Image (cartoon, grey):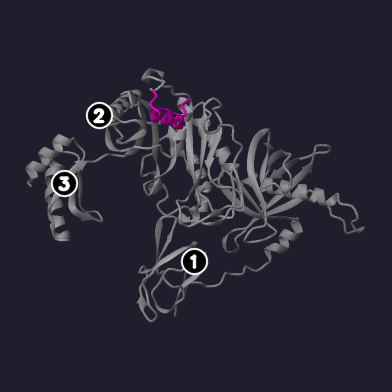
Amino acid sequence: ETADKAVEIAKGIGYPVMIKASAGGGGKGLRVAFNDKEAFEGFTSCRNEARNSFGDDRVFIEKFVEEPRHIEIQVLGDSHGNVVYLNERECSIQRRHQKVIEEAPSPFISEATRKAMGEQAVQLAKAVKYQSAGTVEFVVGKDQSFYFLEMNTRLQVEHPVTEAITGLDLVEMMIRVAAGEKLPIEQKDVQRNGWSIECRINAEDPFRNFLPSTGRLVRFQTPQQTMFQGNTQDLYGVRVDTGVQDGGEIPMFYDSMIAKLIVHGKDRNEAIAKMREALNGFVIRGISSNIPFQAALLAHPRFVSGDFNTGFIAEQYSQGFRAEDVPHDDHDFLAALAAFVRRKSRERAAGLSGQLPGYDVQVGQDYAVVELGKEGKNRYVPVHVDELVGKHGEARITVNGKTYAIASNSRLNDIRIVGTCNGKPFTAQVERGTLKNPLALQVQHNGTRIEALVMSPRMAELHKLMPYKAPPDLSKFVLSPMPGLLVDVSVQPGQKVQAGERVAVIEAMKMENVLFAAADGVVKKVVAAKGESLTVDQMIVEFE
């Protein structure tokens, strides 16, 4: 009720604290105080601001957690009063409060903090006589102070990372506990071996503000698995948990997660390297996925160093996620790989019998890789290929003065190419035919994707002279950015609409997506009706 009382409460909680208007919002009526003076002044300012803005001057005070991390403790309890904690999981890489990457253990907390959090989680579980697997979630400040969030009384999506580092099958444990058995382990028996990371593979388009992506799974090939559910013996490998397959339909009625990719390494750096390579080999076609975004996160220097918190994605990708946010450590390798695949295709074509004399396919050694860019801004890369006589599936390729000795036994019709480059193993994806050009190759590696034409130097010279054909102007239309259910249309024919005004609402994958007008205008006609199922780019509203 008073500034003095506010200071007293703040001291009791411990600085820093957040002083918040009960009816606040949009940053109004909110102050962070680091000492008595700031608490005294902040309370007064907060009340005045709240009274003027909301007509309600009630204020409350809570702990302000600096650079918060989301860390959770896995617990396991039986019906005989035994409870153990199975280390922690770091779940701070989140987007809009949805976890994206989880790992165990945490690269942040100390042994003392781990022990303190674990013991408190066990006390909580014992207090409610908890039986089965469960998770106690905490917010942890940069000073390693931690605060209880909630308890999830179930098995969680990210449980495999705990299984990998402890060697325990949590599902089996849950069944045994439910059957009345005692826990087979005590706290001293809980292991922590190596490092495990999980990436959630979602059916969403990261380049279109993570809009849900539905439709037919034309291709769904997981990377080679060496770890499997229910088997805690074969660790230090790759595991995929999924319920979808080739030819399956990804509908708009369910959550967007279609798979979980889990790796286990001897340490964190090895786990990151394994995950990047596993993502390279994860083939998803027909719908969009968040794999490029996951690849960018894993390569980000702050993630690699472990210096992140729950605000990491919002800070680093505040303008959304773009193709240029996935920097490749050696972009010329992509051009070399495109030339390698094209060269092997030409070699095969040259070996076909029955070709007309003088018109037979010439393999050649000099090529130009034309990377197709936005608005006709293409990148032309001269490439030289040296033939390695007697070595099938190998070639030495020179790009911008750098040499790439590529060897691969993958077939020409394989999307996933596995081989070595300068002696180091790689996995990449190469697909023929793209939306921009049916003759182009799409090359994907470490989250970076290029569309390229591989041609003779003379053809490249002529290609530069081709005029750029601009796409049609669609600014007068509001189009559906995804398949979904049109749950609301907020405008009528003849209505004046301002830029930023709500036009329609589409529901897909448990999320409501609001469409706004891009510019001022007058509604000419409403094409789609409320309750209609929409396809991608289907017209909803047309402006005059």
Dot 3 or dot 2, earlier in sequence: 3
When the figure is inspected, residue 476 is found, relative to residue 185, above or below; the finding is below
Kindly identify the residue that appears in the image at 69 percent across and 49 percent down: 338
Residue furthest bottom in the image: 494
Residue depth check, mark 2 versus mark 1: number of the one nearer the observer: 2
Query: Which amino acid type is shown beneath numbered disc 1?
Result: Leu
The secondary structure that most of the magenta stretch takes on is helix
Kindly identify the residue that appears in the image at 42 percent across and 34 percent down: 306
Left or right: 95, with 538 as reference point: left
| Residue 138 horizontal/vertical position (percent) | 31, 36
Dot 2 or dot 1, earlier in sequence: 2
Dot 1 or dot 3, earlier in sequence: 3
Kindly identify the residue that appears in the image at 30 percent across and 27 percent down: 122
When the figure is inspected, residue 341 is found, relative to residue 72, above or below; the finding is below
On the question of residue 135 being in view, the answer is yes
Q: Secondary structure at mark 1?
A: strand
Cα–Cα span, label 1 and label 3: 45 Å
Which residue in the protein does label 2 denote?
A: 127
Which residue in the protein does label 1 denote?
A: 534
Residue furthest front in the image: 179
Which residue in the protein does label 3 denote?
A: 60
Query: Which amino acid type is shown beneath numbered disc 2?
Result: Ala
